[in-house]
Image (spheres, rainbow, N blue to C red):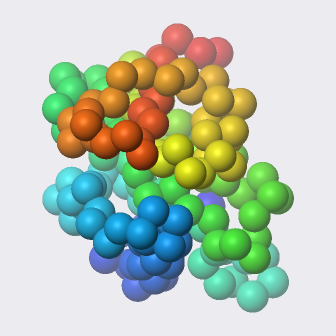
Amino acid sequence: MERVDWTDPDLQRLVADQEREIDARYGDSEHASHLDAETVTVAVLARDVESKEAIACGVLRDPAPGFEAGTGELNRMYVHPDHRRRGIGKEILRALEAVAKERQLGQLVLETGIQQPEAIGLYTSEGYRIIDNYPPYEDDLDSRCFAKAIGEEG
């Protein structure tokens, strides 16, 4: 795992790959989360051990837009298709949760799509629970929002 700036070219390549995949699944090119260097608290990359190519990413925003202080938002969770089903997504998720603990956040929230069962499976297996869709996803029938308490775990 490697922490990088939002402007990192490898991160931006993975974000573009993720957007293309989302567009293909949902037939939509409108991306609701407006991330930039000012809204991203931390971004993490995973690299292939041999090639050193960036193969997965995720970001944390603190605070999550529309939430009170103490709630962060996970975003841009993505693993390149050639590297899925190897636990890399779980490693990214846990790295971002560790950052949330460092920042003394009490809760993380995230949004994913109903046509992403692999993502939903990851989040539920890691203790995230379904919550009401939060803005800007409250009227989006393709969205599913999750939350997890962070602070009180051992």
The front one of 54 and 138 is: 138
Query: Residue 93 location in percent, x, y?
Result: 59, 45
The front one of 122 and 88 is: 122
Picture quarter containing residue 126? top right
For the point 65% across and 46% down, the residue is 117
Looking at the image, the residue that sits furthest to the top is 152
Q: Where is the N terminus found, in terms of image quarters?
A: bottom right
Query: Residue 49 location in percent, x, y?
Result: 78, 76
The answer to whether residue 150 is seen in the rendering is: no
Q: Compared to 50, does 34 lie above or below? A: above
For the point 26% across and 56% down, the residue is 32
Query: Residue 34 location in percent, x, y?
Result: 21, 59
For the point 29% across and 63% down, the residue is 31
The answer to whether residue 21 is seen in the rendering is: yes
Left or right: 60, with 92 as reference point: left
Q: Compared to 89, does 46 lie above or below? A: below
Left or right: 35, with 126 as reference point: left
For the point 71% across and 30% down, the residue is 125
Left or right: 154, with 16 as reference point: right
Query: Residue 10 location in percent, x, y?
Result: 48, 82
